[in-house]
Image (tube, grey):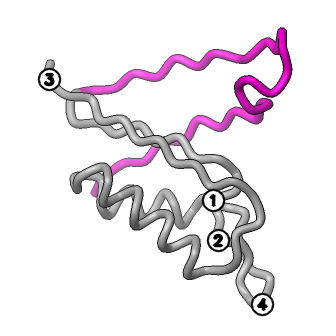
Amino acid sequence: GTQVDEVTSSQLAVGMFEGTVFDAHAVGWQPGDLLALVTDGLIEVFDAQNRELGLAWVRQELAAHSGRPLAEITGRLLAGARAHGPQLDDQTVLLIRRLGA
């Protein structure tokens, strides 16, 4: 199956405060790999029983649909969050696929 690795980095939003210092993370990736950046507002969505959507669901969606067009994957993630429960925070998804050699 498709492997999904996670790099978690809890930091302030870019541009929020002048002079903020950010951590840097290096990741190795190959042609065809997909990099997904999501904000906590996407995973911190709760249903009527107060169950969080969670990162495991995002990982599952990425693994199942990683070869699909980026706009389709983004749409699936945002639609899944909307279907799970009301939006409480910003929901940002940035997908980057490595092309070529």
Judging depth in this view, the residue of 100 and 20 nearest the camera is: 20
Of label 1 and label 4, which has the lower sequence position? Answer: 1
Q: Secondary structure at mark 3?
A: loop
**Based on the displayed image, in which of its 4 quarters is residue 62 positioned?**
bottom left
- Pointer 1 local density, CA inside 10 Å: few below 14, some 14–19, many at least 20: many
Q: Name the residue located 30 percent from the left edge and 53 percent from the top edge.
A: 66
- Residue 72 horizontal side relative to residue 21, left or right: left
Label located before the other in sequence (4 or 3): 4
- Magenta part, dominant SS: loop
Separation of marks 2 and 4 at Cα, in angstroms: 11 Å
Residue 45, by quadrant, is bottom right
Give the residue at x 76% y 35%: 10
| Residue highlighted by disc 2 | 53
Q: Magenta segment: does it hold 101?
A: no
Q: Quadrant of the N terminus?
A: bottom left
- Name the amino acid type tagged 1: Leu
In primary-sequence order, the first of circles 2 and 1 is 1
Question: What residue does disc 4 label?
Answer: 49
Q: Residues within 10 Å of mark 4 (few under 14, many from 20)?
A: few
- Give the residue pinned by disc 1: 42
Bounds of the magenta segment: 1-30
Foreground mark, 1 or 3, reads: 1
Q: Measured along the vertical axis of the image, is residue 22 above or below residue 51?
A: above
Q: Residue at x 37, y 48 (%)?
A: 3
Dot 1: element: helix
Residue 36 x/y as whole percent: 46, 42
Q: What residue is pinned by disc 3?
A: 100
